Image: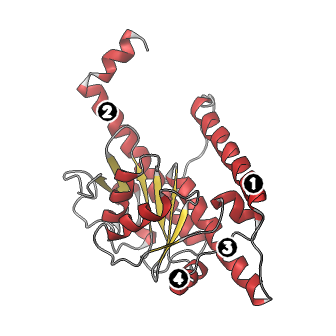
Amino acid sequence: MGAGDAAELHDPYVAGVKTEVAVARVRADVAALHGELVRYGLVVWTGGNVSGRVPGADLFVIKPSGVSYDDLAPENMIVCDLDGQVVEGTPGSSRAPSSDTAAHAFVYRNLPEVGGIVHTHSTYAVAWAARGEEIPCTIVAAAEEFGGPVPVGPFAIVGDDSIGRGIVETLRDSRSRAVLMRSHGPFTIGQTPRDAVRAAVVLEDVARTVHIAREGGAVEPLPAEAIDRLHERTRSLDHQTTVERRVTPPRRGRRSEKTSGRTADK
């Protein structure tokens, strides 16, 4: 690290600008990713949510409560600290955040490797949660994404950090990036918000496929050795992709066309 870099670390103005830039990026990502939940049929009405940790700051971004997915945009996403308190004076702060905000905050405080969290009401995953039954690891997609069965977390009432405690308790010593909160629904975690959304999409596909397979008879879990190899290969590829995104400089030349802040897939 050069002298200039060291000085930047101790310059409150520079640090503040960097935080503002990071918040703006997470706002845009989180707003857009809610469109993916709609596109893949994972939510109903205004239920469900995506949140993202702000790199380099003790903050995260989450959607407002009770707002239509069609009306979600970067400027009405809500910035919270890691205690789940809204950062006053920031865009969107006049609205109430998602009712799951305390749960998300608890996960971010206790699992520092988590950069994104998703909660959906996807039909098949909720059905497994309603039965209080883990999804067995019987297909390759489940092994690759979750590294074993998708576990069931305890029942908890929405509104405080009880759900977050259940998520952390269930996933802390598990390779799974998804948990079925009993009689409620799925929560997924990831290194980034997009990573957590991918896990939510794959989870519903796995939940549906295994449900249909069981209608035809008993299903057998994959051998432990095969699960390990499949999961380790996928995690290795994911890590490689993440590193490449960090070190590859942006292309110069004509800018790619970008959509507006509001998501199109709604």
Q: Which mark is residue 230?
A: 1
Neighbours of disc 1 within 10 Å: few (<14), some (14-19), many (20+): some
**Upstream in sequence: badge 4 or badge 1:** 4
Q: Residue furthest top?
A: 3
- Nearest to the observer: residue 142 or residue 3: 142
Residue 136's disc number: 3
**Label 1 secondary element:** helix
Q: Earlier in the sequence, mark 4 or mark 2?
A: 2
Q: Is residue 204 left or right of residue 225?
A: left
Q: Can you tell which of label 2 and label 1 is closer to the viewer? A: 1
- Where the N terminus falls, by quadrant? top left
Mark with earlier residue (1, 3): 3
- Tags 4 and 2 in contact by the CB under 8 Å rule? no
Q: Are marks 1 and 3 in contact (CB under 8 Å)?
A: no
Tell me which amino acid carries mark 2: Val
Q: Viewer-nearest of labels 2 and 3?
A: 3
Spatial separation of the CA atoms under disc 4 and disc 1: 26 Å
Q: In the rendered view, would you say 127 is above or below 234?
A: below
Residue 245 or residue 45, whichever sits in front: 245
Report whether 155 appears left or right of 241. left
Residue indicated by mark 2: 17
Measure how far apart labels 2 and 3 are at the Cα level: 47 Å
Look at the picture and state if 105 lies above or below 1. Answer: below
In this orientation, which residue lies closer to the viewer: 137 or 39?
A: 137
Q: CA distance from mark 4 to mark 3?
A: 13 Å
Q: Residue 111 in the image: state x and y as whole percent.
A: 42, 51
Amino acid on which disc 4 is placed: Gly
Give the mark nearer the N terminus: 2 vs 3.
2
SS under mark 3 = loop
The amino acid marked with disc number 1 is Leu
Q: Which residue is mark 4?
A: 132
Helix or strand or loop: what does disc 2 sit on? Answer: helix
